[in-house]
Amino acid sequence: MIGETDRPTIDVIIPTYKPGEKTAKLLRRLAKQTYPIGKVIVINTEALYWDESLRGCYPGLEVHHIKKEDFDHGGTRHMAVSFSHADLFLCMTDDAVPAGPHLVERLVEGFGARGPKGERPAMVYGRQLADRDCELSERYARRFNYPKEGCVKTAADIPRLGIKTYFGSNVCCAYDRQIYEDQGGFIRHTIFNEDMIFAGNAVQAGYAVVYEARARVIHSHNYGNRQQFSRNFDLGVSQADHPEVFGGLPSEGEGLRLVGRTAADLLKSGHPFHLPGLVVRCGCKYAGYRLGKVYRHLPDWLVRWCTSSPGYWEMKAGRAVQWAQEETGETI
């Protein structure tokens, strides 16, 4: 547990896959942070794709290689935590670039916040800013999901915020190590959403989730309609698999608010010609999400066509065979 007057230690955890220039920029900016970082731990998928020159971007970089078939959103990050002994650890993706030298400092400060009943933060996530090449409607979506004002979210906010109470992102999110361990850490096998699953369980256990808007990273994607469909399919799958967290908290209302706000911003800024594309994109996202929620009723070939994570289903099928063998004692 972090004391009120302690200066907590912090490590950074970054899963990488075919890391490039953004990863190099991320590491260089971590090296310039005002708050001291203990270790930067990289879990790289496939040694073949690792660029050794990246070690020069951050002195003492710790790199562990895994195979592609062993990668798991929650399990891989949990493995990385085992290499850290710091009070806090910061999860980042390999394409999230700190917007300045105070990122880590602001995240650590966020752990000083408290909920209305004194709830301590289990996690503090940062604000994501759109990159220069970001498509217009995605830029507005970033503003909607990551506003200028920070907040502290607890169980008392569920009636008002719904599923948004559990919103947080491992693109840039720091965790209290002791609370993380007490809560059992990230789920070990999940298609997606390991951050919100952890947040939901933590909030239900009486902890807080803090959004620290002063901690900023540059991170955005220009996903096509097919990619949006598949990502939201995986999102629906993760929610269907965890009714103990997401049951009774529909996401559709928040999605409609985002669409309405984005459409209003496009009209206000004089870009009505972007509206048809917004409608198509949102239709793809909604269709993917709804199919993901009912994936158990879909044929296997359709599930694999819809997903953006085919490796997850291969791993799941392999584990099902393993469990059957253990149950029967026979080779299948």
Image: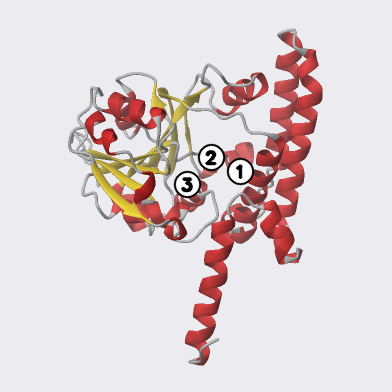
- Residue 195's disc is 3
Is residue 277 rendered to the left or right of residue 87? right
Give the mark, 3 or 2, whose residue is nearer the N terminus.
2
On the image, numbered disc 1 is attached to which residue? 163
Q: Secondary structure at mark 3?
A: helix
Residue at the image position 62 percent from the left and 53 percent from the top: 239
Q: 10 Å neighbourhood of mark 2: few (<14), some, or many (≥20)?
A: many
Give the mark, 1 or 3, whose residue is nearer the N terminus.
1
Q: Given this view, does label 1 or label 3 mark the residue nearer the observer?
A: 3
Q: Position of residue 219 (x, y in %)?
A: 49, 27
- Residue 167's disc is 2
Quadrant housing the C terminus: bottom right
Q: Amino acid at mark 2?
A: Phe
Is the Cβ of the residue at disc 3 closer than 8 Å to that at disc 2? no
Q: Given this view, does label 3 or label 2 mark the residue nearer the observer?
A: 3
Is the Cβ of the residue at disc 2 closer than 8 Å to that at disc 1? yes
Q: Nearer the viewer, residue 304 or 209?
A: 304
Q: Nearer the viewer, residue 211 or 70?
A: 70
Q: 10 Å neighbourhood of mark 3: few (<14), some, or many (≥20)?
A: many
Q: Is residue 303 above or below residue 217?
A: below
Residue 105 seen in this snapshot: no
Residue at the image position 22 percent from the left and 45 percent from the top: 86
